[in-house]
Image (cartoon, grey):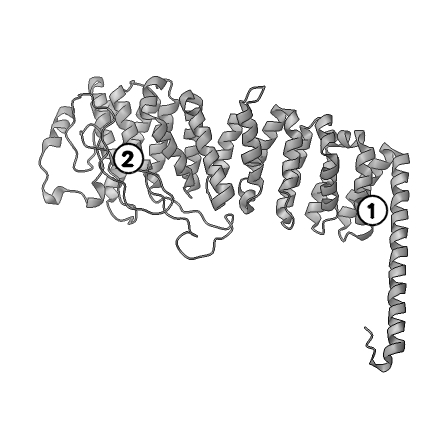
Amino acid sequence: MFKKIIKGGHKKHSKSDSIDGSLHGYGLPGSGHPVSGTNSSVVVNYASRPGHNAKSSNPCPRTTLPPMFAVEPLPLFKDVAVSDRQNLFLRKLQICCFRLDFSNTLKLVREKEIKRQTLLELVDFIQSGSSKITERCQEEMIKMVVVNIFRCLPPASHENTGQEAKDPEDEEPYLEPSWPHLQLVYELLLRYIVSSDTDTKVAKKYIDHTFVSKLIDLFGSEDPREREYLKMVLHRIYGKFMVHRPLIRKAINNIFYRFIYETQRHSGIGELLEILGSIIHGFTLPMKEEHKLFLVRVLIPLHKPKAVSTYHQQLSYCVVQFVEKDYKLADKVIRGLLKYWPMINCQKEVLFLGELEEVLEATQTAEFQRCIVPLFRQIARCLNSAHFQVSERALFLWNNEHIVGLIAHNRRVILPIIFEALERNIQHHWNEDIHGLTANVLKMFLEMDAELFDECEARFAEKKAKARDLEEQREMIWKKLADAAAERGGDHMVTV
């Protein structure tokens, strides 16, 4: 039965039998035809279809399968002899190399369903591990993956349209129409990489530097479903292929540099940071200088872009991981946060305060003492913020036992800096909840050191009295000037 189907590939097709032109132009595994995807490059802006002149990466002689000119169903793996399954695997890969037009949902419906079912069978075949696939099958499978996933990405909604860029949080992501097929291709690749039957020495011939670089470029896709699969695949590649690790780190760094200093637009920053969080977790001590530079030159400046809220959770995790790995980095991290502290964006300030709490929780006394003054000057400004969420989040720092311990140990430096801000909250802040939280903090300081508290209270009263005297003197001087002007100007004097 199977041999008849294979021979059927030699049948000459009439014009009426041929599939729409949108199917053609792509090399097929086992056919001896070039695979266009191997030379294609992933770009963010719309471009023409990739070239079709790539050469096969493995020039060794082999038995070629007859080319396929139409998407036709093939028998299931369980319905053929074990000895024929490798050839059937290659024939199914040929079907999956046809890229179908998804711009029209009513077009090529039968072919789309055949390809989807074929991809499902391939995924099940790899996942079951019932038969170890040959090196040739692995090569052709990666070629099929290349043909399907490496493509030109459509432009973002704000690019080449003349429209003003919107807030990334408000934009609706572009969803890839061919996702029913793409998802299964990614699933097949993922199952192949994680399979215990996959020999890394063989696989790295086909999952090479070029493949990995193009895979990382795909993180620019606006479809969150695709980025999620890319994250899983790249993470597994990083774990399994040691040879690719420096390349992956460098490529991710370059994306971050372009994002921070040039475009400030990229869809995959959060997913890339999530991968890096796992990588940082595996760092050993003493930490390499390369990793410390990455913290200073990439992670800390990533707090600057306006879109930080879209990836802050992953960014905060990476930064805290560094401090937990090496507590001596706490001073650099805290000063970096202060450098990029938002001035007018209250929601961003709330995020910064949350991250600051996590960093302080991993900070030791010596590093804390190095940045006390600038840190608590900023906290004092946050305490007096008219936005109650900022003030509330700053006051919540005193709910953390470790931070309270650090503050208590250095209270003689800290209380004089923030006492005035606390008193102003009690006297002038509009929100009643802030009054209650501030009173609790003042009570805490009073219980820590009543003598110091009285000193600060006396200084504040003295400063307030001096300010009142200065204001009275200023008003008196203005009154004298007004009286003098009234005597000279008479009726021409205008008073306000």
Q: How many marks?
A: 2
In this rendering, the answer to whether 405 lies above or below 481 is above
Q: Earlier in the sequence, mark 2 or mark 1?
A: 2
Q: Is residue 474 left or right of residue 150?
A: right
Which quarter of the image is occupied by the N terminus? top left
Which quarter of the image is occupied by the C terminus? bottom right
In this rendering, the answer to whether 273 lies above or below 488 is above
Residue nearest the observer in this picture, 347 or 70? 347
Residue beneath the point at 61% across and 45% down? 348
Residue 479 x %, y %: 89, 68
Evaluate whether residue 312 shows in this view.
Answer: no
Residue 324 x %, y %: 62, 26
Residue nearest the observer in this picture, 477 or 124? 477
**What's the distance in space between the residues labelled 2 and 1, CA to CA?**
67 Å
Residue 98 x %, y %: 24, 37
Residue mark closest to the camera, 2 vs 1: 2
Looking at the picture, which amino acid does disc 1 mark? Glu
Q: Which residue is mark 2?
A: 39
Residue beneath the point at 86% across and 34% down? 447
Q: Is residue 85 left or right of residue 223?
A: left
Q: Quadrant of residue 23?
A: top left
Label 1 element class: helix
Residue 205 x %, y %: 31, 22
Looking at the picture, which amino acid does disc 2 mark? Asn
Instruction: Answer few, some or many: residues within 10 Å of disc 2's Cα (few below 14, many 20 plus, some between 14 and 19).
Output: some
Q: Quadrant of residue 477?
A: bottom right
Instruction: Answer few, some or many: residues within 10 Å of disc 1's Cα (few below 14, many 20 plus, some between 14 and 19).
Output: some
Residue 423 numbered tag: 1
Residue nearest the observer in this picture, 142 or 112? 142
Label 2 element class: helix
Q: Is residue 250 left or right of residue 102?
A: right
